[in-house]
Image: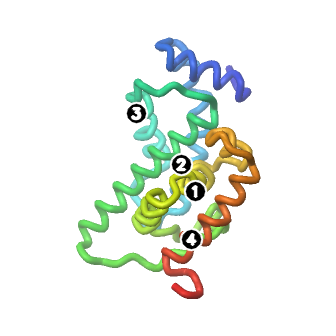
């Protein structure tokens, strides 16, 4: 079973080239990591969430398999796209719940690295998603840094690799984006 990042990258590239056998070999390898990401996401969800980590992985996986025109760069690129799909699924569900409740405002959201490990009540994903879209309109790369680090769980080095920038640039973007989002989400001193 392929475990190294290089072997995963080779399988991803073979899959991109149309090798369905590569997908069969890749699935059990990436499933564990996708499940870890999903568990982290679900730990941040509010109590009473009906979606389970396995269901989130399965839904994200189905969306990934349907993507035909992606030329996978490497393992980090794959997990970055996977994180985007999981984020979209959770935001879609959060928006649907909000629509059902009609007009109920979510609690104020704080954006902090501590959220990465929080196992209690998570951030309001709809508010965070909206703020990230606003940030993307101003500075797309900084928005991507947040998505890759916060939602994708990528390291500074993996994020730098995906974005083709230095780790120092990623750290500077991360610091700026956290401060900007904190202000936008109402958690800043002036907010």
Q: Where is residue 83 drawn, in percent x and y?
A: 52, 45
Say which label, 4 or 2, has the lower sequence index: 2
Task: Say whether marks 4 and 1 touch (CB < 8 Å).
Answer: yes
Between the residue at mark 3 and the residue at mark 2, the CA separation in whole angstroms equals 14 Å
In three-dimensional space, the C-alpha distance between marks 4 and 1, rounded to whole angstroms, equals 10 Å
Tell me the number on the disc at residue 142.
1
Which disc is residue 62 wearing? 3
Which of the pair 121/109 is nearer the observer? 109
| For marks 3 and 2 on the same chain, the one whose residue lies earlier in the sequence | 2
Residue 86 placed where, x, y %? 46, 47
For this orientation, the residue located farthest to the right is 168
| Tally of numbered tags | 4
Q: Are marks 4 and 3 in contact (CB under 8 Å)?
A: no
* Residue at 42% across, 68% down: 127
Cα separation between marks 4 and 2: 26 Å
Report which residue position mark 4 lands on.
Answer: 180
Distance from the alpha carbon under mark 3 to that under mark 1: 28 Å
Measured as percent of width and height from the top left, residue 68 is found at 40, 24
- Foreground: disc 4 or disc 3: 4
Say what secondary structure mark 3 lies in: helix
Q: CA distance from mark 1 to mark 2?
A: 23 Å
Which residue is outermost to the bottom?
Answer: 190
């Amino acid at each position: 079973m392929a475990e190294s990042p290089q072997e995963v990258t080779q399988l991803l590239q073979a899959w991109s080239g149309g090798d369905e056998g590569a997908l069969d070999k890749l699935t059990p390898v990436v499933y564990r990591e996708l499940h870890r990401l999903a568990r982290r996401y679900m730990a941040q969800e509010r109590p009473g969430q009906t979606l389970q980590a396995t269901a989130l992985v399965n839904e994200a996986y189905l969306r990934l398999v349907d993507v035909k025109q992606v030329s996978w760069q490497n393992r980090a690129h794959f997990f970055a796209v996977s994180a985007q799909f999981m984020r979209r699924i959770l935001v879609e569900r959060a928006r649907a719940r909000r629509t059902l409740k009609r007009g109920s405002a979510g609690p104020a959201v704080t954006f902090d690295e501590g959220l990465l490990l929080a196992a209690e009540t998570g951030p309001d994903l709809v508010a965070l998603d909206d703020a990230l879209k606003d940030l993307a309109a101003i500075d797309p790369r900084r928005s991507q840094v947040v998505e890759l680090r916060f939602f994708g769980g990528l390291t500074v080095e993996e994020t730098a690799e995906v974005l083709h920038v230095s780790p120092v640039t990623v750290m500077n973007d991360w610091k700026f984006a956290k401060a900007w989002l904190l202000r936008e989400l109402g958690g800043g001193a002036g907010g």
